[in-house]
Amino acid sequence: MSSTSLAVINTKAPFATSHGKDALNLALIFGSYEQQISLFFIGDGVFQLLQQCDGNTLNVKDFTKTFAALSFYDIENVYVSQESLTKRSLNNSLLIDGVEVLSDDVIQQHLSQHSAVLTF
């Protein structure tokens, strides 16, 4: 991990606040400038990664569809907490492709390798 890497932690459900959209926009901006970005989803943030997530049913713009474009911004490190999934009775098969499920201990190890951590 480079010394200028950024970790973005997502802790909020997708449409309750603008936090998820703000975190994604920030990641895409940094990614467009070829900065090392990792996304982490813990707590209620794991709901952002559900395949069936659909903001249109709530009449809000569904920013979660943009996760499919992360690779175009060279954002390849997308991690989700196994413990958060378990606490919410969710399993890995419900998640979008390209995410890596990790224990909270391993997530903490990954976070410690980043020079900056932002929590949304």
Image (spheres, grey):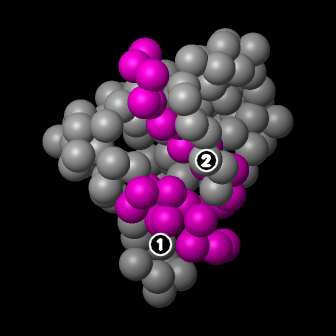
Question: Which marked residue is nearer to the observer: mark 1 or mark 2?
Answer: 2
Element type at mark 1: helix
Which corner quadrant holds the C terminus? Answer: bottom right
Query: Which residues make up the magenta segment?
Result: 1-26
Q: Residue furthest bottom?
A: 59
Along the line of sight, which residue is nearer the eye, 16 or 26? 26
Q: Which residue is mark 2?
A: 118
Q: Indicate whether residue 24 is drawn in magenta.
A: yes
Along the line of sight, which residue is nearer the eye, 81 or 35? 35
- Residue 87 horizontal side relative to residue 24, left or right: right
Residue 66 lies, in percent from the top left, at 31, 56
Q: Is residue 115 above or below residue 57?
A: above
Residue 103 lies, in percent from the top left, at 70, 17
Identify the amino acid type marked 2.
Leu
- Residue 76 horizontal side relative to residue 22, left or right: left
Are the two marked residues, 1 and 2, in contact with CB atoms closer than 8 angstroms?
A: no
Q: Indicate whether residue 14 is drawn in magenta.
A: yes
Q: Residues within 10 Å of mark 1 (few under 14, many from 20)?
A: some
Q: Which residue is mark 1?
A: 55
Q: Is residue 59 above or below residue 2?
A: below
Q: Earlier in the sequence, mark 1 or mark 2?
A: 1
Which corner quadrant holds the N terminus? Answer: top left
Identify the amino acid type marked 1.
Gly
Q: Is residue 10 above or below residue 111?
A: below
Image-quadrant location for residue 40 = top right
User: What residue is at 39 percent from the left and 50 percent from the top?
Assistant: 27
Q: Residue furthest right?
A: 87
User: What residue is at 66 percent from the left and 73 percent from the top?
Assistant: 16
Residue 30 is tagged as none
